[in-house]
Amino acid sequence: MSSFDSMFTYSSALEASNRTAGTFLIDAVTGVMTWSDELYRIHGYQRGEIVPTLELVLAHKHPDDRTKMRELNAALVRAGGHFSSYHRLIDSHQREHRVLTSGEAVLDATGRLFSIAGIMVDLTSTVHSETERAARDAVAGAVRARAVIERARGILMGRLGIGADAAFALLCVHSNHTNKKLAAIASQLVGLAEDPRGAGALTTLVHDLHRHAAHPLRRAGRRSSSRPAVNRRKVVSAAGLLRFTAGVSPWNRTTVGEKSAGDADRTPWQVDSPSPVTS
């Protein structure tokens, strides 16, 4: 039994003490099932407390996985061969485990099942550890992206003399027109601002942000058929927010409340209607 009980496992997410893997052997001729000590522990038992049987094994499978496990067992009895299964297991203490089982079913010369041998690796701790790590990374990434967006807003506020909401609206409108993520645009803006050689490119980018916010519907009407449709409601609301909250229209420096002769019947946050394309 010493070779049967010997298992060497590795997990990049766990220490050796937190890794559990067990082995099993089923003699199809006698019907005897043999478990290693680790397999007893995975199921919530100590050796001697129960006698392992196929019925006991299936009873510990998660109800949603039990039918598939029965189908797998039936296929092994018919055809033999190697197998692998990732599924859920409920131990004797009603704790859920995520396990990976792999092994081989051997047929005799007459094509009848002779034996099934394999291993079961308890991946519960690994799954939890990796999930927690992914969640931490996602939160850290969101915090970094937010910080970059805030810096980009500050750059626009300083260069254009507009408020925080208006600067954010500029980024939103440009994101709609270019189909780029807001965080990517902000990162580009910050990168150019920090690069002494990027002054010209920074001026061009700020000008593009300006231009897109100045004529959101006109540009939306000229988009090519290959570009995904722009959400006009979002574009209009962003441009309206820019014009209404800034107090100053950054593309013509007309203060809110001031009306030209042609603006007599317009509210300060209205957006120009799209013009027909003549060219």
Image (tube, rainbow, N blue to C red):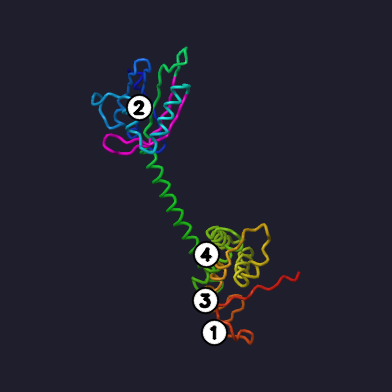
Mark 4: amino acid: Ala
Decide which of tag 4 and tag 2 comes sooner along the chain: 2
Spatial CA span between label 4 and label 1: 28 Å
Is 51 within the magenta?
Answer: no
Q: Which residue is label 1 attached to?
A: 257
Is 90 within the magenta?
Answer: yes
Spatial CA span between label 1 and label 2: 77 Å
Spatial CA span between label 3 and label 4: 16 Å
Neighbours of disc 4 within 10 Å: few (<14), some (14-19), many (20+): many
Horizontal and vertical percent for residue 25? 37, 21
Q: Which residue is label 3 attached to?
A: 246
Horizontal and vertical percent for residue 12? 42, 36
Q: Which quarter shows the C terminus?
A: bottom right
Residue 90 shown left or right of residue 104 in the figure = left
Spatial CA span between label 3 and label 2: 66 Å
Q: Which residue is label 4 attached to?
A: 152
What secondary structure is found at the residue carrying circle 3? Answer: helix
Neighbours of disc 3 within 10 Å: few (<14), some (14-19), many (20+): many
Mark 4 or 1: in front is: 1
Residue located at (53% from left, 67% from top) = 155
Q: Is 254 drawn above or below residue 123 in the view shown?
A: below
Q: Which residues, given as a range, are shown in magenta?
A: 82-105
Decide which of tag 3 and tag 4 comes sooner along the chain: 4
Mark 3 or 4: in front is: 3
Spatial CA span between label 4 and label 2: 54 Å
Q: Which residue is label 2 attached to?
A: 22
Residue 130 shown left or right of residue 176 in the figure = left
**Marks 3,2: beta carbons within 8 A:** no
**Marks 1,3: beta carbons within 8 A:** no
